[in-house]
Amino acid sequence: MNANKTVSRCALKSKLARVDTHVIKPDEYQEIPELTDTMLARAKVNKGGKPVSQNPRELISLRLPADVIARWKATGPGWQTRMADRLKKAR
């Protein structure tokens, strides 16, 4: 299937309306296990996102000639990182 193509609810054959109207009954709660102190002690909070960098980048505004930028972009993806590496070596 094409990743860019949207899928309608009918194509998924889902019963979302039925799921939305479902009311949980008391006997369904018995299927859920009790949380113990051991379970909670093993739990990890996943905040998501990338880990904090030891050397974070700083956003700046820099005006460069268009031909310089075009030349770097022509080197392909990752051109900004390669440019930063080159500037780091020029210290």
Image (cartoon, rainbow, N blue to C red):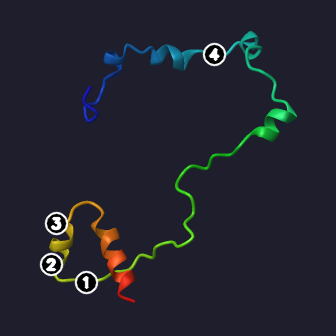
Tag 1 near tag 4, CB within 8 Å: no
Quadrant where the N terminus sits is: top left
Please tell me whether mark 2 or mark 4 is closer to you in this view. Answer: 2
Say which label, 3 or 1, has the lower sequence index.
1
Which sits in the foreground, 20 or 79?
79
Q: Which residue is mark 2?
A: 66
Mark 3 closeness class: few <14, some 14–19, many ≥20 residues within 10 Å: few
Q: Which residue is mark 3?
A: 74
What is the CA distance from the residue labelled 2 to the residue labelled 4? 61 Å
Quadrant where the C terminus sits is: bottom left
What is the CA distance from the residue labelled 1 to the residue labelled 4? 60 Å
Say which amino acid is labelled 2.
Answer: Ala
Say which amino acid is labelled 3.
Answer: Ala
Report x, y in % for residue 32.
74, 19
Report x, y in % for residue 64.
22, 83
Report x, y in % for residue 39.
80, 33
Report x, y in % for residue 53.
54, 66
